[in-house]
Image: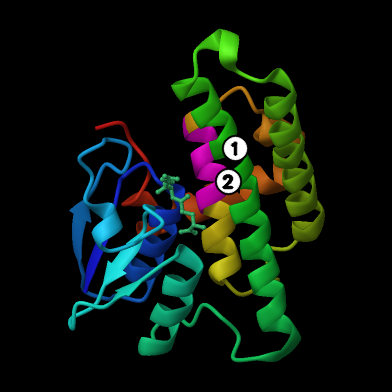
Amino acid sequence: MKLIGSVTSPFVRKVRVVMADKKLDFSFEQENVWVPETMIQQVNPLGKIPCLVMEDGSTLYDSRVIAEYLDTISPVCKLLPPNGRDRAEVKVWEALADGVLDAAILVFIERRDRAPELQSAQWIERQLGKVHAGLREMSTRLGESAYCMGIHYTLADVAAGCALGWLAFRFPEIDWRGDYPNLARLADKLAERPSFRDTAPFLA
Ligand SMILES: N[C@@H](CCC(=O)N[C@@H](CS)C(=O)NCC(=O)O)C(=O)O
């Protein structure tokens, strides 16, 4: 399997963490999807990473689909409950953490790619509102539990840890550690795992 991605994308990181936790072999091909010469649309018409290229050349996207698939191909470190309400709850956690990222990335791109006079303060406020509401909900859901789903590490923690890690990387001004000590405690615990430690985002 070949994973196409970058070392800064939190969605790619989700997949890399899952691969590492489940001890799956893959090659990692870095692709900058933001330059005009990117070839990403040859494997994903949406032009987004992560994209998983299988042995037969077929492709899987997006990160939620890839993570769910990877969990089915190895019994090591099961990350999703087999069915029922618990499985849906893990997927809600994933939707929540990914949704925080979607909103934060829109702000990041607006600020990075648009001239200051063209940036919409209203749009940025709208998206930041989602980021803050999402963080609040993550904190409420976590409560005093060791992990998102209680005592077991799951895909919910992978998604939450990658979202928090990316916010720390790109939005240091958002003080989620100060506002939500329980999220800081979770992030610190996850950062000790080799799968998280080895995939921390960095600027190349
Ligand atoms: N829902 C998708 C989101 C993927 C995504 O937005 N990836 C970003 C990088 S962090 C990307 O490739 N963006 C390129 C673009 O939007 O053109 C997933 O979970 O994989």
Residue shown at 29%/56% (left/top)?
Answer: 41
Do tag 2 and tag 1 residues touch (Cβ < 8 Å)?
A: yes
Q: Tell me which segment is drawn in magenta.
A: 162-169
Relative vertical location of residue 129 with respect to residue 190 in this rendering, above or below? above
Residue receiving disc 1: 104
Relative vertical location of residue 100 with respect to residue 63 in this rendering, above or below? above
Residue 22 in view of the camera = yes
Residue shown at 77%/35% (left/top)?
Answer: 129
Asked whether residue 163 is drawn in magenta, I would say yes
Q: Is mark 2 within 8 Å of ligand 1?
A: yes
Q: Position of residue 28 (x, y in %)?
A: 20, 59
Residue shown at 61%/22% (left/top)?
Answer: 173
Q: For this rendering, which residue is in front, 62 or 189?
A: 62
Q: Is residue 113 left or right of residue 56?
A: right
Q: For this rendering, which residue is in front, 77 or 111?
A: 111
Element class at badge 2: helix
Q: Position of residue 8 (x, y in %)?
A: 36, 41
Residue shown at 19%/77% (left/top)?
Answer: 57
- For disc 2, the neighbor class at 10 Å (few under 14, some 14 to 19, many from 20) is many
Q: Amino acid at mark 2?
A: Leu
